[in-house]
Amino acid sequence: MSIPYSSLPEDRIRLVDRSPSPAIPAINPQQDDLHPLPTIRRWPNQPQRLSRGREVTCFGDIIALIVSLGFIIVAVIVASTNRKPAMEIEKNGLKTVLKWSTTIFPLVFSAVVGRTIKTLAAWKLHLGITLGLLEQLMGSTTVFGTLVTQAQLGINRIGIGLVALWILSPIGSHSSQPALTTVLQNVSSSVGATYLDTRQASKFGVSGTPEALQTPLNAIYLAALMSSEPTKNSSMDLWGNVKIPAYKQLAASLPEASSGWISVPQGAVSYSSLLGIPALNISTTGNTTFAVETTYLDLDCYNISRSAPFPIENRVNETFWSTDMPGNPFSIALDGFVLEDPSTLGPFNSSIENIPNDTDVSGFHHTLLFQSSIYSVGSAPQNTTVAFCTLTQQYIESNVTCSGAFCRVTDIRQSLRTHAPSNITTLSFPFLFQQFSLYFPTATGSVKDSQVNSTATECYIAHPASPFCPAAAGSTFGAVDLSATPKDLFELRLGKLLNTYYQGSLQPFSMTGAFATNPATNISVPASLSFLQERYTVHWLYLGLYAFSAFALLLAAAVGAWFNWQIPGRMCWAIARV
């Protein structure tokens, strides 16, 4: 059977001389308008590249190198993040890249390595290769094909190398995600904290119009007194100020370390005041720790009884003295004061900071007289609770820890700094005490309202959970007999209320949140801020496996590109047809 021959334009090239002579005469082929025929002026000595495949090959090599290099860059970025803070956006981006790397890596590895092995086979074919090696290389362009080919042709060194190369594909894929994780680490930094100086002079002692303080101060005092029982027992007051525990009560029941520190339990704690110490620059995140130096009044009552009222005279430093208004429900008086001029009740800068620590106080009186009317006995001779209490000034150092906005004193001890003698108290200044003893008894109501009922102050001393006394059976008013209150509870509760009213008089508006930085009334101290921060942790074994696999991939892409430019075009075309 004969096959008809159809001539092509290429067949119409006429060679005048096919001799191996290097000089080939020019040929004038027949031309037509549709297919112009080339003129061969010299016979080539070796196969030439297919010009139409050069651009495609170059583009493929560049893509393989860029993608392979991308995996190396990912490994470098992961290594550089070790122990660095994990920002949310950055963390999500890295996790996404590593997640996609798990899927993309084996696909890219298969394409690049398979292409390189084909190129290697073509290059070896150009140089001369055994049929067995050619079959081994051409059958090892995939993971499965490599295993099958080695099983069919037998294991040799080249086969072991090919299997080892292809094993890097799943290793690189599965080691990318475990290479980087995040953990929560405790991070510390030095910051500053500012708190109210409790040694400063009360507004009662420096203000020319102390009556202007009565309304805001009484409101703060009454709000603290009326607060819920959990708030009263909490480590913070109504406005988030940290309370200072009562040192004497803690020392009586808890062990003291050799350094003098007493650990403050988190349970029920006796506090020195219903108001806390305002502080600034407390971070709302993490734990802020700082130390505060504070002072407060402490009572040791040695005589609490029911008797006739004790006389209060208008003679400073000669007997008990105070500004006692007729009809007051209760009164407080002192028998010793710091005087510069008895005729003017000075000094007017009434601050214990101005008292030298070496002041001789051997003959200084510091007894507080507290008297409370007992309305239930009417006009009987013994119608008054009379209490004599030794009044001293406590200087305390406290460690404060704030977890976010919640603060508490964790440790407490007596201050190691030099201070004025403890017998001289914040109430030992006559001008200040004149105002304090006038306004404190009526802080929860006017004199007229207290003619029959006990005040909320007296009711708190008797029953802290019920600052408004419940009416007695068969009566329309509530009254208490404070002489029946145990000594330890009486002195603790009365001292707590004295400190509450005095502390509020330091900076009334600062107590409720308007606390501002003022070097004259505040103390700035160093603080430590620690918080849990999410940080990157690099698992170097997994990252090493991933980086090694990525480097092998990049090397395969580079080797494949080099071989592509070493193979003659016709041989490359031939291997592509296999």
Image: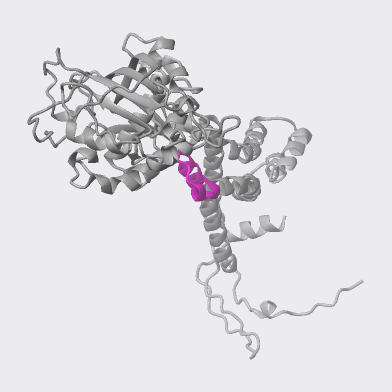
- Tell me if residue 462 comes above or below residue 327 in the rendering: above
Please provide percent x and percent y for residue 168: 62, 37
Give the magenta range: 70-93
Residue 84, quarter of picture: top left
Magenta-highlighted stretch: main secondary structure? helix
Q: In this view, does 536 lie above or below 302?
A: below
Q: In this view, does 542 lie to the left or right of 519?
A: right
Image point (41%, 23%), residue name: 383
Q: Position of residue 78 (x, y in %)?
A: 49, 41
On the picture, is 264 further left or further right than 555? left
What residue appears at the point 65 percent right and 88 percent down from the top-left corner?
A: 34
The percent coordinates of residue 420 (x first, y second) are: 17, 22
From where the camera sits, is residue 437 visible?
yes
Q: In this view, does 269 lie above or below 192?
A: above
> Which corner quadrant holds the C terminus?
bottom right
Given residues 148 and 230, the one toward you in this image is 230
Quarter that holds the N terminus: bottom right
